[in-house]
């Protein structure tokens, strides 16, 4: 039922492009790694992606830079963690059920700050339902994603990008 609501929600062309970019990267590079697992995808500019996959007793993080069309840089890291942050990241109750963008009800009264590249975020369940799905700017206040969770993904993305140069 949730999947049907998510798919039925009419998205703008830009929002649909970010969703498709994330789905394409997952299908192309991580299809087997995410099979029957919950994962979080975070991207900047629909080009650089951090994907955190929840295994039964660990978390596998992938960084994918898809800026060179036809090939991608991919790095992965394994975390053995009982950290509360990781539990919070995969708690479905922490997220909005609908797609959030600057056109959403969440921003009907505006926002304090919006700066930087476009980001895409979604917690995707094993049955492919999406939670917390959003397309916003890198720095945004207020943010519909928990501040600690969002900070984790922005810091990880910046770390990976810096390590490439």
Image: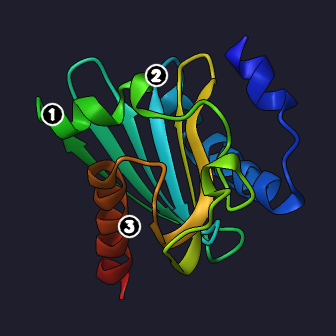
Q: Is residue 53 visible?
A: yes
Residue bearing mark 1: 84
Residue 11 spot, x, y in % from top left: 84, 47
Q: Residue at left 69%, top 48%?
A: 105
Q: Check the image and name the residue furthest to the front.
A: 109
Q: Which residue is mark 3?
A: 157
Which element is circle 2 on?
loop
Which tag, 2 or 1, sits closer to the chain's start? 2
Confirm whether residue 48 shows in the render.
no
The residue pinned by badge 2 equals 37
Image-quadrant location for residue 66: bottom right
Residue at figure coordinates x 43%, y 24% from the top left = 92
Q: Which residue shows up at 79% across the image and 58% down it?
A: 17
Instruction: Tell me where residue 100 appears, x and y as whole percent.
Output: 64, 48
Tell me which numbered mark, 1 or 3, is placed earlier along the sequence.
1
- In x, y percent, where is residue 45? 62, 72
The relative height of residue 66 versus residue 153 in the rendered view (above or below) is: below
**Which of label 2 and label 1 is nearer to you?**
1
* First in residue order: circle 2 vs circle 3: 2
Any mark on residue 130, and which? Answer: none
Q: Residue at x 62, y 76 (%)?
A: 67
Quick check: 146 left or right of 26?
left
Please state which of residues 116 and 24 is positioned toward the viewer in this rendering. Answer: 116
- Where, quadrant-wise, is the C terminus in this rendering? bottom left
Real-space CA distance between mark 2 and mark 1, rounded to the nearest whole angstrom:
19 Å
Give the secondary structure at mark 3: helix
């Amino acid at each position: 039922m949730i999947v049907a609501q998510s798919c039925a929600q009419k998205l703008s062309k830009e929002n649909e492009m970010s969703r498709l970019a994330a789905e394409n990267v997952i299908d192309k590079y991580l299809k087997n790694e995410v099979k029957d697992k919950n994962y979080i995808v975070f991207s900047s500019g629909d080009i650089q992606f951090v994907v955190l996959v929840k295994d039964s007793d660990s978390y596998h993080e992938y960084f994918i830079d898809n800026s060179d069309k036809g090939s991608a840089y991919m790095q992965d890291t394994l975390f053995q963690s009982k950290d509360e942050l990781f539990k919070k990241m995969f708690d479905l109750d922490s997220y909005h059920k609908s797609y959030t963008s600057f056109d959403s009800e969440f921003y009907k009264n505006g926002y304090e700050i919006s700066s930087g590249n476009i980001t895409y975020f979604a917690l995707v369940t094993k049955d492919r339902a999406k939670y917390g799905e959003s397309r916003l700017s890198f720095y945004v206040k207020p943010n519909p994603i928990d501040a600690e969770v969002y900070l984790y993904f922005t810091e990880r993305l910046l770390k990976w990008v810096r390590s490439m140069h």
